[in-house]
Image: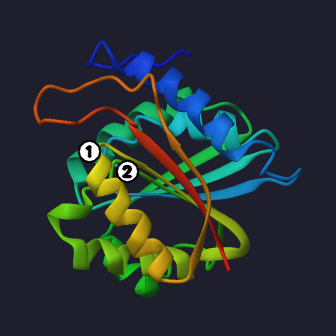
């Protein structure tokens, strides 16, 4: 991978994420170009991994976050480092306002959320999940990863309560432990949902 990250662990984390996503989705992506919405993407470190895993036949990635500075980093990095069959754009926007966003397409093949902080606002995240499901194509998939066991279970419950079907749920045995909070590790869990 040609990317370089400030955090020395990030390249290894991206290799782990690539493996985890491939395991979770299997052959779940067809032979057409893919549209992917990456919500709460921050610097969007995972953009190349998403392009490689989901975009074998081309991909349009739309990243969203409320932090403009983080998105500036993403824009600068990914305008140079994506494969030829991939495009990425980044929007400063609140995920609870997806229904009002006119510059995004109406539906996406994949909605991706990495390390959402569900317990920092369960009502807010439930609204984001609901809006994301409404932007998901009928045959699309929603993919989330989580730092914590409890938070992951809460997110699973919330998303299923909105009518999504849990397709895959994997605990990452090689997740890198983070020391800033007990029980926290990078991409500790991954789950894939479909619409019912």
Where is residue 173 drawn, in percent x and y?
A: 46, 26
In front: 98, or 17?
17
Query: Which residue corresponds to mark 1?
Result: 70
Q: Quadrant of the C terminus?
A: bottom right
In the image, 114: left or right of 29?
A: left
Residue drawn at (36%, 21%) of the image: 10
Q: Is residue 128 above or below residue 82?
A: below
- Pointer 2 local density, CA inside 10 Å: few below 14, some 14–19, many at least 20: many
Q: Is residue 162 above or below residue 14?
A: below
Instruction: Name which of mark 2 and mark 1 comes first in the sequence.
Output: 2
Displayed quadrant of residue 175: top left
Q: Is residue 93 above or below residue 86?
A: below
In front: 155, or 134?
155
In the image, 80: left or right of 180?
A: right
Displayed quadrant of residue 55: top right
Where is residue 15 drawn, in percent x and y?
A: 52, 21
In the image, 196: left or right of 119?
A: right
Where is residue 123 drawn, in percent x and y?
A: 24, 79
- Helix, strand or loop at mark 2: loop
In the image, 54: left or right of 70?
A: right
- Pointer 1 local density, CA inside 10 Å: few below 14, some 14–19, many at least 20: some
Residue drawn at (67%, 35%) of the image: 22
User: How far, Cα to Cα, is label 2 from label 1?
Assistant: 9 Å
Q: Residue furthest right?
A: 31
Residue drawn at (23%, 72%) of the image: 122
In front: 127, or 175?
175
Query: Which residue corresponds to mark 2?
Result: 41
Where is residue 137 drawn, in percent x and y?
A: 69, 74
């Amino acid at each position: 991978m040609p990317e370089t990250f400030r955090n020395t662990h990030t390249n290894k984390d991206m290799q782990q994420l690539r493996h985890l996503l491939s395991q979770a989705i299997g052959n779940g992506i067809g032979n057409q170009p893919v549209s992917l919405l990456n919500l709460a993407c921050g610097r969007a470190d995972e953009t190349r991994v998403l392009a490689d895993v989901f975009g074998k036949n081309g991909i349009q990635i739309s990243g969203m976050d409320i932090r403009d500075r983080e998105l500036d980093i993403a824009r600068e990095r990914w305008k140079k480092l994506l494969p030829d069959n991939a495009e990425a754009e980044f929007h400063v926007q609140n995920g609870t306002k997806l229904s009002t966003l006119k510059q995004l397409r109406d539906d996406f093949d994949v909605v991706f959320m990495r390390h959402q902080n569900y317990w920092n606002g369960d009502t807010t995240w439930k609204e984001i999940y609901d809006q994301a499901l409404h932007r998901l194509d009928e045959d699309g998939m929603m993919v989330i990863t989580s730092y914590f066991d409890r938070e992951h279970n809460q997110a699973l419950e919330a998303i299923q309560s909105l009518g999504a079907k849990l397709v895959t749920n994997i605990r990452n045995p090689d997740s890198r432990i983070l020391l800033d909070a007990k029980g926290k590790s990078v991409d500790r869990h991954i789950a894939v949902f479909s619409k019912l």
